[in-house]
Image (cartoon, rainbow, N blue to C red):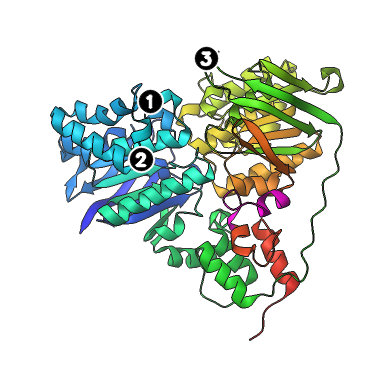
Amino acid sequence: MEILQVENLSFSYPNTKERAIKDITFSVSEGDFIVICGESGCGKTTLLKMLKRELSPYGEKRGRVLYKGRELSELNEREAACEIGFVMQNPEQQIVTDKVWHELAFGLENMGMETNEIRRRVGEMASYFGIADWFHSDTDKLSGGQKQILNLASVMAMQPNVLLLDEPTSQLDPVAASEFIMTLQRLNRELGLTILLIEHRLEDVFSLANKVLVMENGALIFYDGPRTVGERLMREKDSHPIHCGLPSALRIYRALGIEAQCPLTVRDGRRFLTEHFLPEREAVLPPDNPKTETVLEMKNVWFRYEKNLRDVLRGVSLCVSRGESYFLLGGNAAGKTTALHCAAGLQRPYRGKVSMLEKKKQTGKNAVLLPQDPVTVFVRDTVKEDLVEACSSARLPEKEWEGQIEAVCRRTGTYGLLSKHPYDLSGGEQQKCALAKVLLHKPDILLLDEPTKGLDAHAKLELSALLRTLKKDGVTIIAVTHDVEFAAENSDRCALLFDGQIISCDTPRLFFSGNTFYTTSANRMAHHMYRYAVTCDEVVAACKRNGVRHA
């Protein structure tokens, strides 16, 4: 039975000629698990919000959205609020109360439900989602993973029939993200819940879906099973930007050109490699990168936010060289962002020392931080005005402003966004514009907090190219990320922060090849054959180097 029908849906935001949604038609059956993917700015979030009446954006709409055969506008307040749930990308934006138990009850209270029913539903959700141990906690003390689970539980307390999720794992570490996706799978499998999920990180979700919806420039280009969509994308869209965002198994299979069934999962990929390729004859330990002049050092840094609270950092020490890419990984609430803020001088440790190369030896500003939430960077009504403001605060000569803005827009792919309001941009577009603003300060040390959040796979490739260019110019990059694939491809060294301390630091090949969870899908597929291959390109190169297994 069809639970959602989208018929010839088009949408334009006010004062824009280009349609964000273009004549989209598809249907959703009860119990479907649908993954929606496509480039940043292609209309995914706009489409999802139009399926939730209360979040539907303001603008010109054509076409219809039907829920159980009725237009969304015909649903009463209770039906609209309860039967279609929505989980946002940023967990902070959805939490409205100060206590976990109250957050679980908040929506039910607003619906005027009886106390006994509220208590029963809250208790059930707390038990099902494993919230009992932090049921009485303050919401602002929760980790990112806990906040997102709380958001999901609060929505599920309303007993929806359809669950809409907009990149819910974008701010979660790999373990928390995997657990969250497994929870969605349980809800779909055990409750028959219909799920529509927007996701850029397709590794864990692509194979779980029974349908994949691919968008391009506001239009629907594919809507079918994951294997069919994967094969059609590779066959019909040979150079499509989404290729680089497909699961590693698919990308490796495509690059090797072997006639076999297309693998989707790590398990499928391991079997594919074992059956068709010879293992490494001798594992060669990759060489260390030579160290150069130290530009930033943290020695035995201790930090807590309040005197009576626990230490967030407990003796953190690190040393970063000029032109190096140093990536800091770890679970939610491990202290990664705090360490970055200490490096930037935004937080002062109560013990230990943070030192940088003397400013007189540098070309620009010592260190500039791109924060996790790019919205905080914007203070003007258009992107252009924000970039002009950055030129002014960076004290660039006014006659150079236009040229500097044009150059940084070319580098970041943001030239076409100059006239737009920053708040009207997609998450990925906001991230790129925020980076453009930061780069106008010409930093010697660039500090990045979750720089790939909201970026599609193609945008990540563009960011990778930009970081390589900056490194050639002598810029030092220190990044905090949950994106292990991006870290593996772009870091010189990776460090793991746990319990307020850096417990491991090594080159990406050594770091990721020795991990089980904090590693890439490519390494999980190939570790038994090519130990130090951690990226898709490295796995493909190892296969070609060692040869095909003949029958």
Q: Of label 2 and label 1, which has the lower sequence position? A: 2
In this figure, which residue is indicated by the disc labeled 2? Answer: 130
Instruction: Pick whichever, 315 or 387, lies toward us.
Output: 315
All told, the count of numbered labels is 3
On-image quarter of the N terminus: bottom left
Which amino acid type is marked by label 1?
A: Ser
In this figure, which residue is indicated by the disc labeled 3? Answer: 308
In the rendered image, residue 540, in percent from the top left (x then y), is placed at 68, 65
In this figure, which residue is indicated by the disc labeled 1? Answer: 137
Which amino acid type is marked by label 3?
A: Asn
Q: How dense is the environment of label 1, judged by Cα within 10 Å: few (below 14), some, or many (20 and up)? A: some
Circles 2 and 1: CB distance less than 8 Å?
no
In the rendered image, residue 511, in percent from the top left (x then y), is placed at 69, 48
Q: How far apart are marks 2 and 1 (CA)?
A: 13 Å
Which amino acid type is marked by label 2?
A: Gly
In the rendered image, residue 366, in percent from the top left (x then y), is placed at 76, 22
Circles 3 and 2: CB distance less than 8 Å?
no
Q: Of label 3 and label 1, which has the lower sequence position? A: 1
Q: How dense is the environment of label 3, judged by Cα within 10 Å: few (below 14), some, or many (20 and up)? A: few
Left or right placement of residue 476 versus residue 246 in this view: right
Nearer the observer: mark 3 or 1; the answer is 3
